[in-house]
Amino acid sequence: MTKGKVLIAAPVHEVLTGGLEAEGYELLLHEKITQEQGMELIKDCVGVITSTRLLLNNEMIDAAPALRFIGRMGSGMEVIDVPYAESKGIRCVGSPEGNCNAVAEHALGMLLSLNKRILKSHNEIKEGKWLRDENRGTELEGKTIGIIGYGHTGKAFAKLLRGFDVRILVYDKYKRIDTEDHFIICDSVDLIQQEADVLSLHVPFQEDTYHLIDRIFMEKMRKPFILINTSRGTVIDSREISTFLDNGGMKGLVLDVWEEEPLEKMSVQYRKLLNDLIMRNNVLITAHIAGYSNEALFKMSVILLERITK
């Protein structure tokens, strides 16, 4: 006898689907689902696994009276109205530990590529240009790295940086950070703004992180800095970036997320801003793929299976 239907509305590893089926669940596999399809399919489901395609708001939750659990592949529970779900006895679980190393490796890889002009030189060689002096790089050694947000991904990024002989400043508004000898724990962003050569963002999407990095924040950065964002696009006011790249306040930009994504959902204004940025040699942008490794897919799936079936 089946335990009920579970809507799988995200890419998952077979370890999760196989495990749920072994537990007696009937699976509805709809990786490319729309919100409208989700409203219909979820009606008689006891569970749903999502990433970012479905917004589990009160309307969708009310459409599923039998719903008992919601699983989130990855980090960021903003796509789920967690308080409302929990008020109706629905368990909400995430798997942020599963892709934090993937995000950290991606952020570091993009930073190194930018600093060492790897992608620029590669593209020039494809055009028949062998340029050396024009591509003299910059090392990380001796630099000061500011990390805002010290959850799973912020901590994973800091861990990877340990081998580069850098000074690490860490700030988290909500999380108590245990003192570590090789980190400097900040009570505010002030020291980061004064001393950071690189600023990396690892914060969730919520009301107080919307446009956290705005014109006022960037004006307080005392050094020309490289900005890295692998968290959520709305954390940065994208309209202000070009100004600081033009005036030298920002010496480089690394983004895996954007305020409006994907491309087909982007307004004319934000597509124009994006097009301006990608033409610059000191900018690297990827399509929200930082946490999208094969290993992360497996690890997130294992974590969710354990939390759903325990």
Image: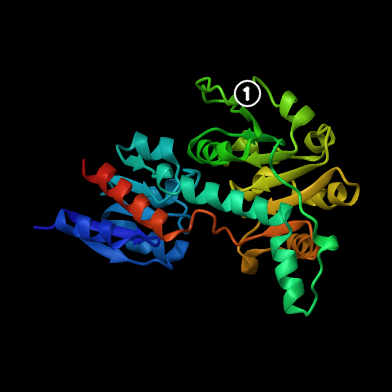
Side of 165 relative to 190 (left or right): left
Q: Is residue 275 above or below residue 74?
A: below
Q: Residues within 10 Å of mark 1 (few under 14, many from 20)?
A: some
The image position of residue 302, as x and y in percent, is 30, 50
Q: Secondary structure at mark 1?
A: strand
Q: How many marks?
A: 1
- At 79% from the left and 28% from the top, the residue drawn is 194
Please say if 16 is above or below 249: below
Q: Residue furthest right?
A: 247
Q: Is residue 68 left or right of residue 34?
A: left
- Residue at (70% x, 62% y) in the render: 118
Residue 4 versus residue 195 in the image, above or below: below
Image quarter (top left, top right, bottom left or bottom right) of the C terminus: top left
Residue at left offset 64%, top offset 19%: 187
Residue 255 visible in image: no
Which residue in the structure is indicated by mark 1? Answer: 184
Which of 145 and 261 lies nearest the eye of the viewer?
145
Q: Where on the picture, by quarter, is residue 262? A: bottom right
The percent position of residue 295, horizontal first and vertical second, equals 39, 56
Residue 307 spot, x, y in % from top left: 28, 42
Q: Tell me which corner region of the image, top left, top right, bottom left or bottom right, holds residue 263.
A: bottom right
Asked if residue 118 can be seen in this view, the reply is yes
Which residue type does callout 1 highlight? Ile
Which is more toward the observer, 198 or 162? 162
Please, which colouring scheme is shown? rainbow
Image quadrant holding the N terminus, namely: bottom left
> Residue at left 77%, top 53%?
137
